[in-house]
Image (tube, helix red, strand yellow):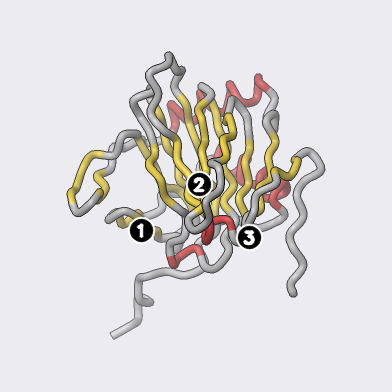
Amino acid sequence: MPEQPRLHSGMRAIPLPDGDLGYAPDFLAPAEADQFMRQLLDGIEWQQHHVVVFGRQLPAPRLSAWHGSAKAHYAYSGLELEPRPWTAPLLDLKTRIEAAADCSLNSVLLNQYRDGRDSMGWHSDDEPELGANPTIASLSLGGTRRFLLRHKRRDLAPVEIPLGHGALLIMRGPTQTYWQHQVPKTRRPCAPRLNLTFRRIVATRRPPTDAP
């Protein structure tokens, strides 16, 4: 069996049946988190994508952007995403998070939750491009939101993790196979939040450029 990647010493494991979670609530110091949030709010070309939900194409309840290496094409919920180039702040964060996750990452999905009405529904990051047992490293900036996980097959109590300013959550191993996660809407006052999920695209649905 291949050796399991190590978690950075600043992270702690969260027990999860059929899963593998690492968590660092203070991965970034508050001043650093403030700086990155300003840079990303101003320096990213945010868009409201349309996603397919139960056969209907609807505007996503959040703003998004996809950045990464040139071949890191990605598709989910009816979207076909072309990667924008890495920016200096994103490369800085990528280097730090690669060290924490002990793996290489080549892309990042950024989501902007403008208030409590913006959300992310139940899903798993299990697209074919990610390969088997992908590592998903999720960095949060801004207002704290509830992050929920539920098992797909077993009658287990949902797991809730508060993701606050500067927190890093790493999901690895079989987590995406057995668990779904979401960021639900809330009526409570909530400051704007950015979430960056770094990942590695290992395959592409696009044929080579020299293909017939």
In the figure, 161 relative to 1: above or below? above
Mark number displayed over residue 173: 3
Quadrant of res 128: bottom left
First of labels 2, 3 by sequence position: 2
Q: Which amino acid does label 3 sit on?
A: Gly
Residue 185 image position (x, y, % from top left): 38, 28
**Residue found at x 53% / y 55%:** 154
**Quick one: 152 or 95, which is closer to the camera?**
152
Question: Upstream in the sequence, badge 1 or badge 2?
Answer: 1
Q: Mark 2 points at which residue?
A: 150
Specify the quadrant of the image occupied by residue 204: bottom left
Q: Which is closer to the viewer, label 2 or label 3? A: 2
- The number of numbered badges drawn on the structure is 3
Instruction: Give neighbour class at mark 2: few <14, some 14-19, many 20+ (Cα, 10 Å).
Output: some
Residue found 74% across the figure and 59% down from its top? 5
Q: In the image, 158: left or right of 212?
A: right
Give whichever of 31, 152 is nearer the camera: 152
**C-alpha separation, residue under disc 1 versus residue under disc 2:** 23 Å
- Find residue 75 and name its label: 1
Mark 3 residue crowding within 10 angstroms, few (<14) / some (14–19) / many (20+): some
Residue 83 point in image, percent of width and height: 41, 53
Q: What element carries label 3?
A: loop
Whole-number angstrom distance, CA of label 3 to CA of label 1? 21 Å
Label 1: which secondary element:
strand
Give the amino acid type for the residue marked by disc 2 in the picture: Arg
Q: Distance between the residues labelled 2 and 3?
A: 16 Å
Q: Position of residue 7 (x, y in %)?
A: 75, 49
The kind of residue on which mark 1 rests is Ala
Res. 121 image quadrant:
top left
Q: Check the picture and name the quadrant holding the C terminus.
A: bottom left
SS at badge 2: strand
